[in-house]
DNA sequence: AGCATCACCTGGCTGC
DNA sequence: TGCAGCCAGGTGATGC
Protein backbone atom coordinates (compact mmCIF):
# COMPACT_ATOMS: atom_id res chain seq x y z
CA UNK A 1 0.00 0.00 0.00
CA UNK A 2 2.66 2.48 -0.88
CA UNK A 3 1.35 6.04 -0.81
CA UNK A 4 3.25 9.28 -1.31
CA UNK A 5 5.65 8.95 1.67
CA UNK A 6 6.63 5.40 0.74
CA UNK A 7 7.05 6.25 -2.95
CA UNK A 8 9.12 9.32 -2.04
CA UNK A 9 11.37 7.18 0.18
CA UNK A 10 11.84 4.74 -2.70
CA UNK A 11 12.53 7.66 -5.05
CA UNK A 12 15.26 9.01 -2.80
CA UNK A 13 16.86 5.59 -2.54
CA UNK A 14 16.92 5.21 -6.32
CA UNK A 15 18.00 8.80 -6.97
CA UNK A 16 21.11 8.04 -4.89
CA UNK A 17 22.22 5.16 -7.10
CA UNK A 18 20.67 5.23 -10.59
CA UNK A 19 21.49 8.54 -12.30
CA UNK A 20 24.29 8.07 -14.81
CA UNK A 21 23.70 4.35 -15.14
CA UNK A 22 22.89 2.71 -18.46
CA UNK A 23 20.31 -0.06 -18.76
CA UNK A 24 22.09 -3.07 -20.24
CA UNK A 25 19.31 -5.63 -19.87
CA UNK A 26 15.61 -5.88 -19.11
CA UNK A 27 13.70 -9.06 -18.34
CA UNK A 28 9.93 -8.68 -18.22
CA UNK A 29 8.36 -11.93 -17.07
CA UNK A 30 5.03 -10.58 -15.92
CA UNK A 31 2.79 -9.69 -18.84
CA UNK A 32 0.34 -7.83 -16.61
CA UNK A 33 3.05 -5.47 -15.38
CA UNK A 34 3.63 -4.22 -18.95
CA UNK A 35 -0.07 -4.37 -19.89
CA UNK A 36 -0.40 -0.74 -20.96
CA UNK A 37 1.91 -0.71 -23.98
CA UNK A 38 3.48 -4.17 -23.87
CA UNK A 39 6.84 -5.63 -22.90
CA UNK A 40 8.42 -5.03 -26.30
CA UNK A 41 7.84 -1.29 -26.01
CA UNK A 42 9.53 -1.31 -22.61
CA UNK A 43 12.47 -3.26 -23.99
CA UNK A 44 13.09 -1.00 -26.93
CA UNK A 45 12.81 2.22 -24.92
CA UNK A 46 14.87 1.11 -21.93
CA UNK A 47 17.71 -1.09 -23.10
CA UNK A 48 20.66 1.16 -23.95
CA UNK A 49 19.16 4.22 -22.25
CA UNK A 50 20.87 6.08 -19.41
CA UNK A 51 18.82 7.09 -16.37
CA UNK A 52 19.38 10.81 -15.83
CA UNK A 53 17.02 11.38 -12.89
CA UNK A 54 14.38 9.81 -10.67
CA UNK A 55 11.30 11.92 -9.96
CA UNK A 56 7.86 11.40 -8.53
CA UNK A 57 4.36 12.71 -9.02
CA UNK A 58 1.85 11.53 -6.44
CA UNK A 59 2.31 7.77 -6.23
CA UNK A 60 4.02 7.53 -9.64
CA UNK A 61 7.78 7.09 -9.97
CA UNK A 62 9.25 8.87 -13.00
CA UNK A 63 12.60 7.73 -14.42
CA UNK A 64 13.97 10.29 -16.86
CA UNK A 65 16.06 8.81 -19.63
CA UNK A 66 18.78 10.40 -21.76
CA UNK A 67 16.55 9.79 -24.79
CA UNK A 68 14.13 12.36 -23.37
CA UNK A 69 11.58 9.68 -22.64
CA UNK A 70 10.19 8.86 -19.19
CA UNK A 71 9.62 5.46 -17.59
CA UNK A 72 6.57 5.49 -15.33
CA UNK A 73 6.33 2.92 -12.51
CA UNK A 74 3.29 2.61 -10.26
CA UNK A 75 3.48 0.14 -7.36
CA UNK A 76 -0.27 0.09 -6.64
CA UNK A 77 -0.93 -2.21 -3.68
CA UNK A 78 1.83 -4.76 -3.51
CA UNK A 79 4.61 -3.62 -5.83
CA UNK A 80 8.10 -3.57 -4.36
CA UNK A 81 11.40 -2.31 -5.82
CA UNK A 82 14.73 -3.62 -4.59
CA UNK A 83 18.08 -2.34 -5.79
CA UNK A 84 21.08 -4.65 -5.46
CA UNK A 85 24.57 -3.43 -6.25
CA UNK A 86 25.85 -7.03 -6.08
CA UNK A 87 22.92 -9.32 -6.98
CA UNK A 88 24.94 -12.54 -7.30
CA UNK A 89 23.60 -15.18 -4.96
CA UNK A 90 20.63 -13.10 -3.81
CA UNK A 91 17.57 -15.23 -4.66
CA UNK A 92 14.66 -13.71 -6.55
CA UNK A 93 11.68 -13.19 -4.29
CA UNK A 94 8.44 -14.84 -5.53
CA UNK A 95 6.37 -12.80 -7.99
CA UNK A 96 9.34 -10.97 -9.45
CA UNK A 97 8.03 -9.58 -12.75
CA UNK A 98 10.76 -7.21 -13.97
CA UNK A 99 14.54 -7.30 -13.59
CA UNK A 100 16.51 -4.32 -14.89
CA UNK A 101 20.28 -4.69 -15.19
CA UNK A 102 22.57 -1.67 -15.24
CA UNK A 103 26.15 -1.23 -16.31
CA UNK A 104 28.47 -1.82 -13.39
CA UNK A 105 26.43 -4.83 -12.30
CA UNK A 106 23.62 -3.21 -10.28
CA UNK A 107 20.13 -4.66 -10.62
CA UNK A 108 16.64 -3.28 -9.96
CA UNK A 109 14.07 -5.98 -9.20
CA UNK A 110 10.32 -5.44 -9.21
CA UNK A 111 8.08 -7.88 -7.38
CA UNK A 112 4.31 -7.60 -7.13
CA UNK A 113 2.15 -10.51 -5.88
CA UNK A 114 -1.16 -8.90 -6.79
CA UNK A 115 0.01 -7.70 -10.19
CA UNK A 116 -1.81 -4.36 -10.01
CA UNK A 117 1.45 -2.46 -10.40
CA UNK A 118 2.57 -1.29 -13.83
CA UNK A 119 5.57 -0.21 -15.85
CA UNK A 120 5.37 1.79 -19.06
CA UNK A 121 7.35 4.33 -21.03
CA UNK A 122 5.24 7.41 -21.61
CA UNK A 123 3.95 8.15 -25.08
CA UNK A 124 5.05 11.76 -24.58
CA UNK A 125 5.34 14.68 -22.23
CA UNK A 126 3.10 17.68 -21.69
CA UNK A 127 4.28 21.30 -21.56
CA UNK A 128 5.53 20.85 -17.99
CA UNK A 129 7.56 17.79 -18.84
CA UNK A 130 5.13 15.36 -17.21
CA UNK A 131 3.91 12.15 -18.87
CA UNK A 132 0.66 12.75 -20.72
CA UNK A 133 -0.78 9.63 -19.11
CA UNK A 134 -0.80 11.59 -15.83
CA UNK A 135 -2.75 14.54 -17.24
CA UNK A 136 -5.68 14.19 -14.88
CA UNK A 137 -3.62 14.09 -11.69
CA UNK A 138 -4.02 16.86 -9.16
CA UNK A 139 -1.06 18.76 -7.71
CA UNK A 140 1.55 17.00 -5.60
CA UNK A 141 1.33 18.16 -1.98
CA UNK A 142 5.11 18.08 -1.56
CA UNK A 143 5.90 20.05 -4.72
CA UNK A 144 8.24 22.98 -4.02
CA UNK A 145 5.62 25.59 -4.82
CA UNK A 146 2.99 24.11 -2.48
CA UNK A 147 2.18 26.11 0.63
CA UNK A 148 -0.39 25.66 3.35
CA UNK A 149 -2.30 28.72 2.17
CA UNK A 150 -2.13 27.58 -1.44
CA UNK A 151 -3.34 24.12 -0.55
CA UNK A 152 -6.15 25.58 1.56
CA UNK A 153 -7.35 27.61 -1.44
CA UNK A 154 -7.10 24.51 -3.63
CA UNK A 155 -9.07 22.44 -1.12
CA UNK A 156 -11.69 25.16 -0.74
CA UNK A 157 -12.40 24.99 -4.48
CA UNK A 158 -12.28 21.19 -4.59
CA UNK A 159 -14.55 20.65 -1.58
CA UNK A 160 -17.12 23.31 -2.41
CA UNK A 161 -20.57 21.90 -3.02
CA UNK A 162 -19.46 18.30 -2.65
CA UNK A 163 -21.63 15.94 -0.68
CA UNK A 164 -19.04 13.17 -0.69
CA UNK A 165 -17.07 12.48 2.48
CA UNK A 166 -13.96 14.56 3.15
CA UNK A 167 -11.95 11.37 3.03
CA UNK A 168 -13.12 10.40 -0.45
CA UNK A 169 -12.02 13.82 -1.72
CA UNK A 170 -8.62 13.44 -0.01
CA UNK A 171 -7.95 10.13 -1.75
CA UNK A 172 -9.21 11.43 -5.13
CA UNK A 173 -6.01 11.63 -7.17
CA UNK A 174 -7.58 14.22 -9.51
CA UNK A 175 -7.85 16.58 -6.53
CA UNK A 176 -4.50 15.84 -4.90
CA UNK A 177 -1.93 13.28 -5.99
CA UNK A 178 -0.44 10.97 -3.39
CA UNK A 179 -2.84 10.40 -0.49
CA UNK A 180 -4.30 6.93 0.02
CA UNK A 181 -6.39 5.22 2.67
CA UNK A 182 -3.80 5.20 5.45
CA UNK A 183 -2.66 8.81 5.26
CA UNK A 184 -6.19 10.09 4.66
CA UNK A 185 -7.18 8.77 8.10
CA UNK A 186 -4.08 10.20 9.76
CA UNK A 187 -4.65 13.57 8.05
CA UNK A 188 -8.28 13.70 9.20
CA UNK A 189 -7.16 12.88 12.74
CA UNK A 190 -4.56 15.64 12.77
CA UNK A 191 -7.14 18.06 11.36
CA UNK A 192 -9.65 16.94 14.04
CA UNK A 193 -12.20 16.23 11.31
CA UNK A 194 -14.36 13.14 10.92
CA UNK A 195 -13.48 11.39 7.63
CA UNK A 196 -17.18 10.99 6.85
CA UNK A 197 -18.00 14.70 7.12
CA UNK A 198 -19.66 15.93 3.91
CA UNK A 199 -16.85 17.82 2.18
CA UNK A 200 -18.95 20.81 1.25
CA UNK A 201 -19.94 21.42 4.88
CA UNK A 202 -16.45 22.35 6.05
CA UNK A 203 -15.95 25.88 7.33
CA UNK A 204 -12.98 27.94 6.18
CA UNK A 205 -11.05 27.31 9.40
CA UNK A 206 -11.59 23.58 8.98
CA UNK A 207 -10.38 23.65 5.39
CA UNK A 208 -7.28 25.46 6.65
CA UNK A 209 -6.72 22.76 9.27
CA UNK A 210 -7.13 20.08 6.61
CA UNK A 211 -4.47 21.73 4.43
CA UNK A 212 -2.07 22.11 7.34
CA UNK A 213 -2.65 18.55 8.49
CA UNK A 214 -2.09 17.20 4.97
CA UNK A 215 1.31 18.85 4.66
CA UNK A 216 2.41 18.11 8.23
CA UNK A 217 1.37 14.45 8.10
CA UNK A 218 3.01 13.75 4.75
CA UNK A 219 6.21 15.59 5.67
CA UNK A 220 6.48 13.73 8.98
CA UNK A 221 5.85 10.42 7.21
CA UNK A 222 8.53 11.13 4.60
CA UNK A 223 10.96 12.10 7.36
CA UNK A 224 10.26 8.72 9.02
CA UNK A 225 10.77 6.77 5.78
CA UNK A 226 7.08 5.85 5.35
CA UNK A 227 4.95 3.21 7.08
CA UNK A 228 5.68 -0.52 7.17
CA UNK A 229 2.68 -2.50 8.46
CA UNK A 230 2.68 -6.00 9.90
CA UNK A 231 2.46 -7.49 6.40
CA UNK A 232 5.85 -5.89 5.57
CA UNK A 233 4.60 -5.21 2.05
CA UNK A 234 6.46 -1.93 2.04
CA UNK A 235 10.21 -1.74 2.45
CA UNK A 236 12.57 0.71 0.78
CA UNK A 237 14.94 -0.15 -2.10
CA UNK A 238 17.49 -1.56 0.36
CA UNK A 239 14.89 -3.66 2.18
CA UNK A 240 14.65 -1.32 5.18
CA UNK A 241 11.35 -0.80 6.98
CA UNK A 242 9.72 2.58 7.47
CA UNK A 243 9.25 4.04 10.94
CA UNK A 244 6.12 6.16 10.66
CA UNK A 245 3.81 3.32 11.80
CA UNK A 246 4.97 4.07 15.37
CA UNK A 247 3.34 7.50 14.98
CA UNK A 248 -0.02 6.28 13.64
CA UNK A 249 -2.78 7.77 15.75
CA UNK A 250 -5.82 5.96 14.35
CA UNK A 251 -5.09 3.84 11.27
CA UNK A 252 -5.62 0.16 12.08
CA UNK A 253 -6.00 0.96 15.80
CA UNK A 254 -9.65 0.10 16.52
CA UNK A 255 -10.28 -0.11 20.26
CA UNK A 256 -6.93 1.42 21.23
CA UNK A 257 -6.86 4.79 22.99
CA UNK A 258 -6.78 8.01 21.00
CA UNK A 259 -3.34 9.57 21.66
CA UNK A 260 -4.99 12.99 22.05
CA UNK A 261 -7.97 12.32 24.34
CA UNK A 262 -7.84 8.66 25.31
CA UNK A 263 -11.21 7.65 23.85
CA UNK A 264 -11.31 4.33 22.02
CA UNK A 265 -10.53 4.56 18.31
CA UNK A 266 -13.51 3.51 16.19
CA UNK A 267 -13.68 1.88 12.79
CA UNK A 268 -16.29 2.55 10.15
CA UNK A 269 -16.72 2.34 6.40
CA UNK A 270 -16.37 5.46 4.29
CA UNK A 271 -16.68 5.33 0.51
CA UNK A 272 -16.34 1.55 0.59
CA UNK A 273 -13.07 1.58 2.55
CA UNK A 274 -12.23 1.06 6.19
CA UNK A 275 -11.73 4.29 8.09
CA UNK A 276 -10.47 4.77 11.62
CA UNK A 277 -11.11 7.83 13.76
CA UNK A 278 -11.42 9.13 17.27
CA UNK A 279 -15.19 9.60 17.74
CA UNK A 280 -14.60 12.11 20.54
CA UNK A 281 -12.07 14.59 19.22
CA UNK A 282 -12.78 14.43 15.48
CA UNK A 283 -15.88 16.41 14.53
C1' DA B 1 -22.44 15.43 -13.10
C1' DG B 2 -21.52 13.41 -8.93
C1' DC B 3 -21.32 9.73 -6.18
C1' DA B 4 -21.22 4.73 -4.93
C1' DT B 5 -20.02 0.24 -6.09
C1' DC B 6 -17.60 -3.26 -8.47
C1' DA B 7 -13.63 -5.71 -10.75
C1' DC B 8 -9.07 -6.61 -10.84
C1' DC B 9 -5.59 -9.89 -7.80
C1' DT B 10 -3.15 -12.83 -4.07
C1' DG B 11 -1.75 -13.57 0.67
C1' DG B 12 -3.04 -13.77 5.18
C1' DC B 13 -6.27 -14.17 8.61
C1' DT B 14 -10.72 -15.88 10.82
C1' DG B 15 -13.90 -19.14 11.97
C1' DC B 16 -16.07 -23.44 11.43
C1' DT C 1 -5.56 -29.47 11.02
C1' DG C 2 -7.78 -28.05 6.83
C1' DC C 3 -10.14 -25.21 4.19
C1' DA C 4 -13.74 -21.93 2.67
C1' DG C 5 -14.58 -17.31 2.83
C1' DC C 6 -13.46 -12.74 3.65
C1' DC C 7 -10.59 -8.67 3.73
C1' DA C 8 -6.87 -5.52 2.37
C1' DG C 9 -6.77 -1.20 -1.26
C1' DG C 10 -5.42 2.16 -6.06
C1' DT C 11 -7.57 2.85 -9.99
C1' DG C 12 -10.64 2.54 -13.91
C1' DA C 13 -15.17 0.99 -15.38
C1' DT C 14 -19.87 0.79 -14.57
C1' DG C 15 -24.33 1.99 -12.78
C1' DC C 16 -27.62 4.85 -10.51
Image (cartoon, coloured by chain):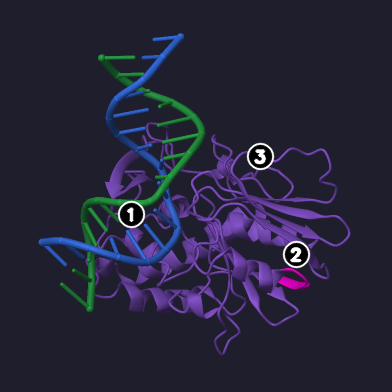
Chain colours: A purple, B green, C blue
**Relative to the observer, which residue lies in front, A178 or A49?**
A49
Q: Residues within 10 Å of mark 2 (few under 14, many from 20)?
A: some
Label 3: which residue? A93
Compute the Cα span from label 1 to label 2: 35 Å
Q: Are marks 1 and 2 in contact (CB under 8 Å)?
A: no
Marked residue nearer the N-terminal end (3 or 2):
2
The outermost residue toward the bottom is: A127
Q: Which mark is residue A195?
A: 1
In the image, what residue occupies the spot 82% across and 67% down?
Answer: A21
Marked residue nearer the N-terminal end (3 or 1):
3
Depth check, mark 1 against mark 2: the one in front is 2
Quarter-of-image position of residue A67? bottom right
Q: Label 3: state its secondary structure.
A: loop
Q: Is residue A252 left or right of residue A62?
A: left
Label 2: which residue? A15
**Relative to the observer, which residue lies in front, A159 or A60?**
A60
Chain of the residue displaying label 1: A
Provide residue C16's location: percent of width, then percent of height: 10, 61
Compute the Cα span from label 3 to label 1: 37 Å
Amino acid sequence: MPELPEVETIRRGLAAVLPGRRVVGLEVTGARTARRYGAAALQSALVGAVVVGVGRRGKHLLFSLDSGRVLVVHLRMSGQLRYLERPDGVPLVPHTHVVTRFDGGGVLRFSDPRTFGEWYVSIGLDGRGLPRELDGLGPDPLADEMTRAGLARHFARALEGRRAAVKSVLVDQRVLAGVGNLYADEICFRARLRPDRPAGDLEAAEVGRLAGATLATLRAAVAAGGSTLADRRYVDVRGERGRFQAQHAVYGRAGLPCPRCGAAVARLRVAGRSAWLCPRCQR
